[in-house]
Image: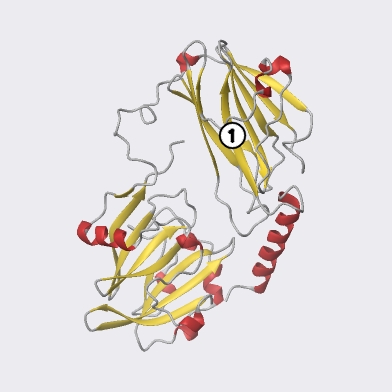
Amino acid sequence: MLSRDLHALDALAIFLCILICSGTARADYSTPHAEVVCQPGHNVALVRFTMTADEDPVVYRQLPASADQGLSATPTLGQSNCTMANGWTIRLRDGQKQAFGYGMGGADPPAFFSLWIAKRKILSRKQWKPGYAMDEDPWLIGLVIRPDRLSYCYVARSYTAPHDGAITCRDESFQLNRHEIDHVEYGTSGRRPPVGTILLARGTTQPRLCRKFLRLRPKGFQSVSTTVNDTANVFPVETAGQDINIATVEVSPGVLRKLVRWSGTNHYFDGDLMLLAPVTADPSKILKESMLDDDGDKFSADKLPSGWSVIAGHMPRLYPDVSWRYVHFDTQRIDGRLYLLAQPTNWEERPTAILVQLLANGFKSVCVIQRIEPHF
């Protein structure tokens, strides 16, 4: 139902990203790497970054000796913690932003890191690798740590960065006591659940049902919402992948409704608009592409006939701060009853997922699900 122009632009963007963002036509995939190195007996440490293509070994560039006292000549160690001679502990955690299958550079997300020194958070989500083809920021390939200063070493952004290009370093004064101890990262043992733990958050109204639901989803939630999903096999198989799917469902004993899913997987509309309609309704006569042209974040029910209900992002108790265009839904049956699992397209949005129960005239949120993420 979406315009051919939008699809064509997305396809072109993906093709151009393959040519521009990969760095080499022969690489099938690239992987960012980061590690920290301390020099025994000296008050100097190095955080360094690089990229590898396919299964190539991890090799970091050597910095000018004047910048790091030759520490970058150390072979690859693959460590994220070390200790300087003065007893300062150095901790590194690195990550990437979300990749998307559309948009210029969507498949080439930025990479970032957080840094702790002596249990104090010094940097949080600082970008070292630019991405999304949105700017000409340089690559940070090394950060040298000394008690009184931090030295940032960069190479200019290019198709061969970070492996080639002139290295330039700049110093920044540093005072440890200006930063507070991070009690989340260095809290008491067992205070924070392990990364990946699934919790039921505030707003959950049926914990017993929710725990049963979690047992039905052993693979978790990440990536589930990025394609058209129908775990409960509600929609006809022959319509899978189409923009609009329609099924007749029982929302409560003896009460039938038509469940309509209007889906998009492009930059403009990467989500699902769920609708409940009378069983006699003909959605093909009601739903028009022009309905997607409203720039507002909330899909207004006044666009629909009497008896229709909207289930979408930007509604109360269902990602009220996220546009309806960027929340996906999956189906799930629990004890014979149909539910919808809502998840934001952007993985950084919280909560991780919300399970909603279908009602004759709408929905209610019953499970608010939170996954413990790495602390940055």
Q: Residue at x 36, y 31 (%)?
A: 184
Q: Give residue 376's position: percent from left, percent from top.
A: 46, 35
Q: If the image is split into quadrants, where does the N terminus sit?
A: bottom right
Q: Give residue 73's position: percent from left, percent from top.
A: 68, 23
Q: Amino acid at mark 1?
A: Ala
Q: Give residue 300's position: percent from left, percent from top.
A: 43, 68
Q: How is the image coloured?
A: secondary structure
Which residue reaches farthest bottom? Answer: 280
Q: Residue at x 58, y 62 (%)?
A: 268
Taking the image as drawn, is residue 143 in sight? Answer: yes
325 sits to left or right of 220: right
327 sits to left or right of 365: right
Q: Residue at x 59, y 34 (%)?
A: 34
Taking the image as drawn, is residue 125 in sight? Answer: no
166 sits to left or right of 110: right
Q: Give residue 97's position: percent from left, percent from top.
A: 55, 46
Q: Residue at x 22, y 84 (%)?
A: 254
Secondary structure, mark 1, is strand
* Residue at the spot of label 1: 34
Residue 330: which quarter of the image? bottom left
- Of 299 and 100, nearer the camera is 100
190 sits to left or right of 270: left
**Neighbour class for label 1 at 10 Å: few (<14), some, many (≥20)?**
many
In the rendered image, the vertical position of residue 237 relative to residue 15, given as above or below: below
- Of 61 and 225, nearer the camera is 61
In the rendered image, the vertical position of residue 6 relative to residue 145, given as above or below: below
In the rendered image, the vertical position of residue 143 relative to residue 177, given as above or below: below
Residue 337: which quarter of the image? bottom left
Q: Please give the count of numbered marks on the rendered protein.
A: 1
